[in-house]
Image (tube, helix red, strand yellow):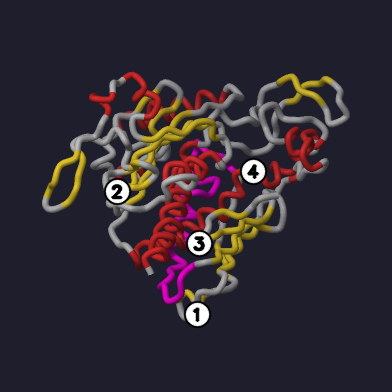
Amino acid sequence: MSSTFGQVFRIHTFGESHGGGVGVVIDGCPPRIPLSLEHIQHELDRRRPGQSEIVTPRKEADTAEILSGLQDGVTLGCPIAILVRNTDQRPGAYDEMAAKYRPSHADYTYDAKYGIRSASGGGRASARETIGRVAAAAVARQVLDALHPGIEILAWVKSIQELNADVDPQTICAEIIESNIVRTGDPAMAETMIDRIKAIRADGNSVGGVIECVIRNCPPGLGEPIFDKLEADLAKAMLCLPATKGFEIGSGFAGTLLTGREHNDAFRMVDGKVRTTTNHSGGIQGGISNGENIIFRIAFKPTATIMSSQETVTSAGENTELSGKGRHDACVLPRAVPIVEAMATLILTDHLLRQRAMAW
């Protein structure tokens, strides 16, 4: 099972949703980087369950333990192992799901591939696996701050179903995003989105939407021109998150409606730097960052596990029905915001270190 991500700044996540714990081993982190456990914990707190009335009520402190790679608050250049113990497992809620496949979940496909699966909580298919990614990205964030300060990575809920937020990626700030529990960048839409999620949950159903992300102050020159294009790696990073179904950058699919004259980003010299007058490219051209804001969007489907009866089959091949049990998000987007930021941080850190290695 592939659980390793990155080339220079590499991470390997481990653990199942209802096992003893989950975590990550980070390899390739440069030495002598000041590392704050408080920052790692802050990011895990943004991702953890039970943080508001619109997310899963599972109660986990998600306390990070750094097991290796650190001395006196500074990285050693050795592998960094971070563990988060599971303390609120309820495997009994999954007894029925052990024999019945949840529609649109990974239950059936894991069985088809491996012939065995961790039924409790979905095992590795659970969003709880992303704890390791968020912890690793909190380390990567501190690498970025040390080697190239000023890079900003911000994500927010752009839409819940047809409810669309009005957000300016040039000016949005973390304080606005974190000012509401749905984590939209448009506070005027927050209550409407929250009410929609509550109504969907009360009906035993789930709902999806779109998260938008901006990377500001990214230097030009990051990314590779062929198979490791920066947008291709960002797309892989986002589409390997649970519940994702789509990725677009810059003008995305809407760009197909424009002509080349309309879509091309004209170059101009501004304060001695090459800049573009528009940003339909989304900050990346030829697979390489051009110094403009990198802007992309990710589609998240409705959560697969719902509290309504659905047709399904058993692992023995019998037709049956299943109603979800346990504690689940009716909408994954509010908790996915820090995870999107985390994956973007991992990609940027990896490419920055690759660029530094090439220039060495």
Mark 4, Cα crowd under 10 Å, few <14 / some 14-19 / many 20+, is: some
Regarding residue 245, the answer to whether it shows in the image is yes
Nearer the camera: disc 3 or disc 4: 3
Alpha carbons under labels 2 and 4: distance apart? 31 Å
User: Where, by quadrant of the figure, is residue 64 drawn?
Assistant: bottom right
* N-terminal-most mark, 2 or 3: 3
* N-terminal-most mark, 2 or 4: 4
Amino acid carrying label 4: it is Ser
Q: Which residue is mark 3?
A: 8
* N-terminal-most mark, 3 or 4: 3
Residue 335 versus residue 71: which sits nearer the camera?
71
Using the image, tell me which numbered label, if any, was put on residue 71.
1
Tag 2 secondary structure: strand
Q: In the image, residue 301 lies at what x, y percent?
A: 54, 29
Residue 202 versus residue 114: which sits nearer the camera?
114
Q: Which residue is mark 4?
A: 126
Tag 3 secondary structure: loop
Q: In the image, residue 305 lies at what x, y percent?
A: 65, 31
* N-terminal-most mark, 1 or 2: 1
Tag 4 secondary structure: loop
Amino acid carrying label 2: it is Arg
The residue stretch that appears in magenta: 29-57
Regarding residue 179, the answer to whether it shows in the image is no
Alpha carbons under labels 1 and 2: distance apart? 32 Å
Mark 2, Cα crowd under 10 Å, few <14 / some 14-19 / many 20+, is: some
- In the image, 41: left or right of 122? left
Alpha carbons under labels 3 and 1: distance apart? 22 Å
Q: Residue furthest left?
A: 271
